[in-house]
């Protein structure tokens, strides 16, 4: 039997087709994965009692699915079922954005930002299988700090019960990218105002030990390479 692989592109839908700057939209699977894999903080949007709510939370991508971390006391996670009959999943919109540069134009109107973003629409289900939940949480820890899950105590039964995980399949998804110089009006090109890019970088600093760290515990090697 011949193995089948996902299409190199996600299918565009009404919800994933932007109404503005459509030329920046992309459904390339590799690009979507790259944007998701570079980050670990997303914004989770949903509707509660008829009003929109957006919450920041941590996530990790595993294949064609993202897992989102939260507390069982969180309203969206309490309202999300496992997708079975009588326990419907939660309709959500998840966004991830990386700002690469501030774009300074000659006119205030054309100031912008260079960015890479991903938007995912779908129904997020609560993960109830203990094995899937534990694997997702380990993957999340390693996504934020590679190598960390093997260098800390794993969650016990009580902690797993207090931790909620949402799973969202990457089906209705798109990326959007803005790059390059400012785009000024032809009549503004000779104005005496500087124009260009201010690059934006995100980086971690050196490890700072906890004040109550036991004597003799050395900084792990995987932190020294970040």
Image (cartoon, helix red, strand yellow):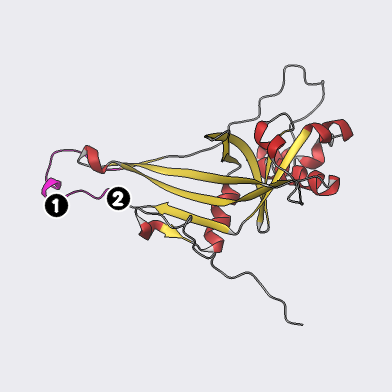
Which residue lies under the disc numbered 2? 181
Q: Nearer the viewer, residue 223 or 1?
A: 1
| Relative vertical location of residue 14 with respect to residue 205 in this rendering, above or below | below
Q: Which residue is rendered at x = 20% and y = 41% of the image?
A: 106
Q: Is residue 219 magenta?
A: no
Q: Which residue is rendered at x = 71% and y = 35% of the image?
A: 78
Image coordinates of residue 209 in percent, x first then y, are 70, 23
Which residue lies under the disc numbered 1? 186
When asked about the image quadrant of residue 226, the answer is: top right
Q: Report the magenta residues as a range.
A: 182-196
Q: Is residue 183 magenta?
A: yes
Q: Is residue 226 left or right of residue 188?
A: right
Image coordinates of residue 25 in percent, x first then y, are 42, 58
Please count the marks in the image.
2
Q: What predominant SS class does the magenta segment belong to?
A: loop
In the current view of this chain or complex, which residue is farthest to the top? 211
Image coordinates of residue 54 in percent, x first then y, are 54, 35
When asked about the image quadrant of residue 220, the answer is: top right
Q: Nearer the viewer, residue 180 or 221?
A: 180
Image coordinates of residue 164 in percent, x first then y, are 74, 37
In front: mark 2 or mark 1?
1
Is disc 1 placed on a helix, strand or loop? helix
In the current view of this chain or complex, which residue is farthest to the bottom? 1
* Placement of the N terminus among the 4 image quadrants: bottom right
- Say whether marks 2 and 1 touch (CB < 8 Å): no
Is disc 2 placed on a helix, strand or loop? loop
Q: Which residue is rendered at x = 86% and y = 31% of the image?
A: 158
Q: Which residue is rendered at x = 14% and y = 48% of the image?
A: 189
């Amino acid at each position: 039997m011949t193995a089948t692989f996902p299409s190199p592109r996600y299918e565009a839908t009404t919800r994933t087709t932007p109404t503005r700057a459509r030329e920046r939209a992309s459904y390339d699977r590799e690009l979507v994965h790259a944007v998701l894999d570079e980050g670990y903080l997303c914004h989770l949007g949903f509707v509660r009692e008829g009003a929109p709510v957006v919450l920041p939370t941590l996530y990790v991508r595993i294949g064609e699915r993202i897992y989102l971390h939260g507390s069982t006391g969180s309203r969206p996670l309490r309202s999300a079922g496992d997708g079975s009959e009588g326990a419907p999943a939660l309709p959500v919109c998840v966004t991830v954005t990386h700002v690469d540069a501030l774009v300074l134009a000659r006119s205030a109107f054309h100031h912008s930002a260079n960015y890479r973003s991903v938007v995912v629409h779908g129904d997020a289900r609560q993960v109830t299988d203990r094995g899937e939940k534990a694997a997702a949480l380990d993957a999340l820890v390693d996504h934020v700090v590679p190598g960390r899950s093997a260098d800390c105590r794993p969650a016990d039964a009580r902690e797993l019960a207090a931790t909620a995980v949402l799973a969202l399949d990457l089906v209705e998804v798109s990326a959007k990218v803005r790059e390059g110089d400012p785009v000024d009006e032809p009549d503004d090109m000779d104005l005496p105002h500087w124009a260009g890019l201010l690059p934006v970088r995100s980086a971690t600093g050196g490890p700072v030990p906890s004040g109550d760290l036991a004597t003799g515990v050395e900084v792990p090697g995987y932190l020294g390479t970040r």
